[in-house]
Amino acid sequence: MRWIILTLLACLAGRNPAAETPEHVAAGEKRRAEIPLGGDFHPNPQVPAFVVCGHGGRILVSRDDGRTWRQTLLGVTSGDHGVWATRTMTYGGGVFVVAVGWGAPTSWLASEDGVNWRHLSAGATVLPEGKGNPRIMPGTWGLAAGGGAMVGTGYMTMAATADLGKTLAPFSLWGLAKNDPRGKLQTHHLDPVYCGDASRRFLALGDNRSPQGPKFGHLFASDDLGKTWRWLEPRGLEACDSRGQMVCNGRLLLLTDRETALAWTSTDGGETWSGPQATGTQRATLSVVNGEFWLCGRVSRASTDGLNWRDLPKAVPEGQIIASDQGTLISLHPQRTHILRSTDGGQGWTEVHRYDPEPVQGGAQGLRDGAFGFLTR
């Protein structure tokens, strides 16, 4: 099976994931099958909410601007590789979507009310990875939403839906670069970004797994809401040779090199880039906060244009920052099993939720991703 091959590739890449026992895999598959198929979502987004997720399919929801939290789903405890490994989610069209499974069969779970979770897929489309099981999606490192579509990318295959799971459009990178002068295409850890409604373009940034070229590697573009992709030849990124992070604030793309504290910007959907520009911090997590770029690490910095950077309050914690429509901030980190909240722009923070994870090998049990959106009542 392909997922076994992908797990082995992850090991070869140095991840050295802890192997799941056959009993644990069986329990994970049983839990997957218990969750109903979707495709019949009727979102009526009215209630502002934060939704966050962590390994094992742990999903926490706050309907009161981050003050209190409720756990609405827990699948099967998992490390960072396995049937219920969880690291990405997105929000769009009144629906929150969480991907579970990495280095193993993957599913996309969705909810319009934050309480009842179903597979996003209606089951009408069975993807090649599923081998007859409509609940299986391509391995998913990242999810993004925009233009009425949901896009997921991870290894050499991806999928998209423009009708909230009624139908799915698969795409494979295998053979995409045949006879390309850059050599054989080898990539993974693909993370997608929506570039805004002006272009309606999705970009996906992946590692370079071949011996040649910069480590950050590969940039792919889709101009039909994730149905088809092409391998870009971006100009201006020659100095970026580490694993990158990329976000968009709706008009400007920002890519940072985690190791060198450098940043590049693009205004044409990733075709050309300006930079590098020093950010003043490295190994920091990149977020978009009220349209501004925030890099939060041991030193935290912010910029509106990717060129000029200012210090954030020293109290700003490391990790991902998510803002509500009221300006409230929450902070997550994969190494933390608690959520921090700020109502004064990051000057002060309060712990608003903490959970006790079950012991598991192969990955920290903190929160991996989150989003702000609007739930159906």
Image (tube, rainbow, N blue to C red):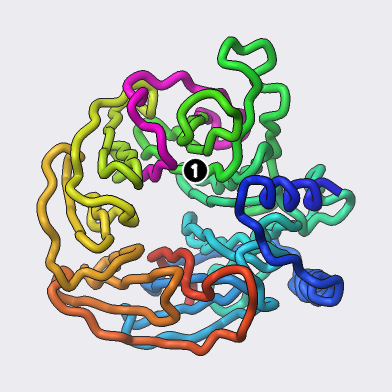
- Seen in the picture, residue 285 relative to 335 is either above or below; the reply is above
Task: Identify which residue is drawn at 32% across, 21% down.
Answer: 236
- Seen in the picture, residue 85 relative to 166 is either above or below; the reply is below
Task: Identify which residue is drawn at 25% across, 26% down.
Answer: 274
- The answer to whether residue 291 is seen in the rendering is yes
Task: Identify which residue is drawn at 44% across, 80% down.
Answer: 337
Task: Identify which residue is drawn at 35% across, 47% down.
Answer: 258
Question: Residue 312 lies in what quarter of the image?
Answer: bottom left
- Left or right: 303 as drawn, with respect to 297: left
Q: Position of residue 75 (x, y in %)?
A: 67, 77
* Residue bounds of the magenta highlight: 221-247
244 falls in the magenta region: yes
Q: Nearer the viewer, residue 366 or 145?
A: 366
- The answer to whether residue 124 is seen in the rendering is no
- Seen in the picture, residue 357 relative to 21 is either above or below; the reply is below
- Seen in the picture, residue 364 relative to 68 is either above or below; the reply is above
Residue at disc 1, secondary structure:
strand
Main secondary structure of the magenta stretch:
loop
Q: Nearer the viewer, residue 138 or 295?
A: 295
Kind of residue sitting beneath label 1: Pro
57 falls in the magenta region: no
Q: Position of residue 88 (x, y in %)?
A: 53, 59
- Left or right: 302 as drawn, with respect to 192: left
Q: Position of residue 373 (x, y in %)?
A: 40, 65
Residue pointed to by mark 1: 192
Question: Residue 127 lies in what quarter of the image?
Answer: top right
Q: Outermost residue toward the right?
A: 132
Judge the density around disc 1: few (<14), some (14-19), many (≥20) Cα neighbours within 10 Å: many
Q: Position of residue 139 (x, y in %)?
A: 68, 50
